[in-house]
Amino acid sequence: MYKSVADTAQDLSMPEHQVMRYVLEGRIRAVHDGQQFLVNSDQFERYFKQLERIKEEIEIWKNTPIPEDIDIKDED
């Protein structure tokens, strides 16, 4: 499915000018139909999967309690 640069920017939560820059640099593959660039949204499937995995790992890290340090002794 092909989307416009504006729709792609909204899906990626990025500014439209940044997505356009990535298209012009070749970092995002796009097709020019004579009037606008169209981006194939299937190329971001892996990106979204990785983003979700990273969010899950951050939540696990935040919810993991800090273990007590065995080197610290309560001596006065």
Image (spheres, rainbow, N blue to C red):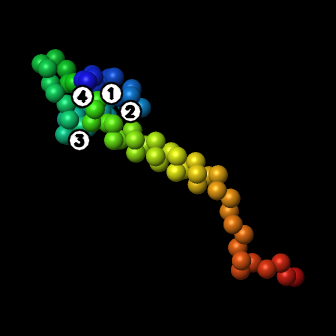
Amino acid marked by disc 3: Arg
Give yes or no for contact between labels 4 and 1 (Cβ–Cβ under 8 Å). yes
Q: What residue is at 34 percent from the left and 23 percent from the top? A: 7
- Where disc 2 sits, the SS reads helix
* Badge 1 element: helix
For the point 40% across and 45% down, the residue is 50
Q: Earlier in the sequence, mark 2 or mark 4?
A: 2
**What amino acid type should be assigned to the residue bearing mark 1?**
Thr
Marker disc for residue 8: 1
Q: Position of residue 53 (x, y in %)?
A: 46, 46
Residue 4's spot in the image, x, y percent?
27, 22
- The alpha-carbon separation of the residues under discs 2 and 4 comes to 12 Å
Labels 2 & 1 near each other (Cβ < 8 A) = yes
- Label annotation for residue 12: 2
Q: CA distance from mark 4 to mark 3?
A: 11 Å
Assign the C terminus to one quadrant of the image.
bottom right
For the residue labelled by badge 4, is the local secondary structure a helix, a strand or a loop? Answer: strand
Residue 13 in the figure: left or right of residue 43: right
Q: Is residue 34 left or right of residue 48?
A: left
Badge 3: residue crowd in 10 Å (few <14, some 14–19, many ≥20) = few
- Give the residue number, with chain letter if any, for mark 4: 39
Check the image and name the residue furthest to the bottom. Answer: 76
Amino acid at circle 2? Leu
Instruction: Tell me the number on the disc at residue 27.
Output: 3
Q: Label 2 near label 3: C-beta < 8 Å?
A: no
Mark 4 or mark 3: which comes first in sequence? 3
Question: In what element is the residue under mark 3?
Answer: loop
Q: Is residue 11 above or below residue 53?
A: above
